[in-house]
Amino acid sequence: MIRFLIKGILGDKNRSVLPIIIITIGVSLTILLSGYLRGVMGDMIDQSARFDTGHVKIMSRSYAEDQVQMPNDLALLGVEAIKEQLASDYPDVQWADRIKFGGLIDVPDGKEGSKGQGPAAGLAFDLFSGVSGEDERLNISHSIVKGKLPSQPREALIGNDFADKLNIQMGDEITYMGTTMNGSMTFENFVVSGTIKFGIAAMDKGAIIIDISDARVLLDMHDAVGELLGFFEGGVYDDDKALAIAAEFNQKYAHDKDEYAPQMFALREQNSLGGYLDYVDYFAGLFVGIFVFAMSVVLWNTGLLGGLRRYQEFGIRLALGESRGHIYRTLIYEAIFIGFTGSVAGTIVGLSGTYYLQVYGIDVGDMMQESTMMVPSIMRAKMTPDLLYIGFVPGLFAMVFGNMLSGIGIYKRSTASLFKELEV
Amino acid sequence: MTTESIISIKDVTKRFPVGGGEFTALHKINLEFETGEFSGLIGPSGSGKTTLLNIMGSLDTPTEGQAIVMGKDISKLTHKQSALLRNMHLGFVFQVYNLLPVYTVFENVEFSLLLQNWSAAERKKMVMESLEWVGLQDIADKKPAKLSGGEGQRVAIARAMVKRPEIVLADEPTANLDAANAHTIIQTMKRLSHELKTTFIFSTHDEKVMGYLDRIISLEDGKVKKEQQVEAKFSLS
Ligand SMILES: Nc1ncnc2c1ncn2[C@@H]1O[C@H](COP(=O)(O)OP(=O)(O)O)[C@@H](O)[C@H]1O
Ligand SMILES: [Mg+2]
């Protein structure tokens, strides 16, 4: 009987090809979009953690309120003492000093004048010690386009686009102009050791990267830091852990009224990332739900049409002594076979597509030119084990469910009227 | 002719709902059919022939009265029981032969055996034997689309006969055939009726068919107008 059914399905293209195509498309889109959504959100969060928020981040309360202004006059003081305490309280968390600073970069023309100027988006962190892990974390070495990492004081990396625009060569001098922590003017010349392109629109605009020790001198920030970022072991964000650590840390300073007292934030609590985290789950779920529903409706309809077309066949089978229940069950077996085939095909197509998008990604750098969000300019999908069933199960379910609905027609109609279809 | 009747129709009335009211297709029909009989329902189109055959074939039930087929009151059967009755004891031949297009001739004939528990070897033997009865053993592997009308209807007869049913119900089986094919087919059925003691009940308004019948039952407006035993005009050639 099974052989008979399979032959029927294969022999009747109308019965198999269309539903298989629908399922394949639905399943592969579900997988692809889920994988893409996860990948992009995951990358965004990861990127954000590395460059901006850490898994947890400590700032002074007033700095935190005004963070986007990079208000170094409100910087966190007594950093060494705080870090010592953190190291004993949370030995498995790595802490990284970061100073962000604004200002202006001037490129002298070697005579009296200037080749050009631009706003500086400065970032300073520990480059020289060699044990901070910041190079790997920020992927600096791989992001260098020309030249090399700064290796001695008063060397800087600058944004590649900026360097191209002003025709800056390796070894050229540039001048940074800005204000110190205490509000006085400061100038310093830096030798360009290399140029950099992160592929993050917000980072690449006017970037200047220097070692934290240079920044402390330049901005007069001894034993001070704008932001202290904490990273969990293995570089994987753990929401519950981050929230717990932050709550515990902040508890200690709860009675301190000082506006410069340190305050810790979990990743979720910064830049609305908590909302993103929740939205990823929410949208992934919603998405799959909508697809299952839409696929079910479409398959129900193709099932209905197929069923109508097959009333003659059902009539003959009834006359030959097959029971309605048996016919109904064979319809369900057919649906399982077709649903399975389509879901397997869809899963293969979907996973291949996801893999492609994981390796190559989609370059959205141009669209993101104006963005100040920490968004990777190449959006990649991410293969996760749940993609194996996230499309498969709904695909199979939709086909079987659709056919169960349409097959009810066999029960609703009387035997005689199914049989009537035989009269021409 | 009381206890032995293979089919007995008692005061059968069939009404169909139409629009707001009802249409009476059969009106208090009383008929008995004996084992091995070769009989036919004749009458103009719309007189109720198909409706009566459907009831005798347990594809439909009477509104009133009883239809006893092989000792079973078909009104009292569940869907499953009536399917079993059809599968084990009843064969159907339709005006259009209605073969399933994706299957070969062999598979079309084999289908009802798949519903019973025959082994593949037994099925093969039975299918080939019934194809021999209709003289089509050589085209077992053809698809229905490749058959002529006469061949198609002979396959339909093989399909009805393969399980050796006690009763075959044939609704206008020659209506779409030319004279030569009509004769061949009706002769085949008559021969099988003799050899296998199968009861055949036709519905027809084909004169050629009537010539082979032992008994003719005339229906008109859902009533039996006349019943006559006849000396078959054509004998087996
Ligand atoms: N399912 C049905 N619903 C309504 N009327 C029907 C139905 N089946 C048959 N009839 C009517 O019953 C009458 C007898 O039909 P039928 O038995 O098919 O006649 P015949 O086979 O002798 O041509 C016809 O008038 C037909 O329109
Ligand atoms: Mg009719």
Image (tube, helix red, strand yellow):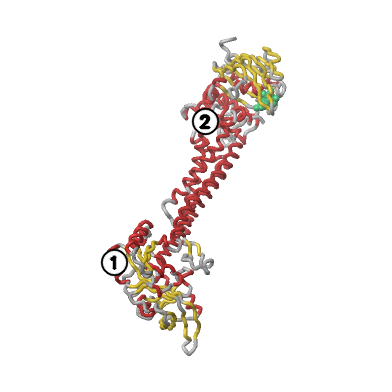
From the viewer's side, name the closer residue of A291 and A27: A291
Rendering coords of residue A4 (x, y %):
51, 35
Discs 1 and 2 share one subunit = yes
- For marks 1 and 2, the one nearer the N-term is 1
Question: From where the camera sits, is residue A218 visible?
Answer: yes
Which residue is tagged 1? A85
Rendering coords of residue A92 (x, y %):
30, 62
Instruction: Examine the image and state in which quarter residue B187 appears.
Output: top right
Rendering coords of residue B105 (x, y %):
57, 32
Please tell me the numbered disc located at residue A325. Answer: 2
Secondary structure type for disc 2: helix
Q: Judge whether A91 appears above or below A386 on screen.
A: below
Quarter holding ligand 1? top right
From the viewer's side, name the closer residue of A125 and A70: A70
Task: Tell me the amino acid under the disc marked 2.
Answer: Gly
Q: Chain of mark 1?
A: A
Question: From where the camera sits, is residue B195 visible?
Answer: no
What residue is shown at x 67% (from left), y 31% (from top)? A424
- Is residue A384 rendered to the left or right of residue B144? left
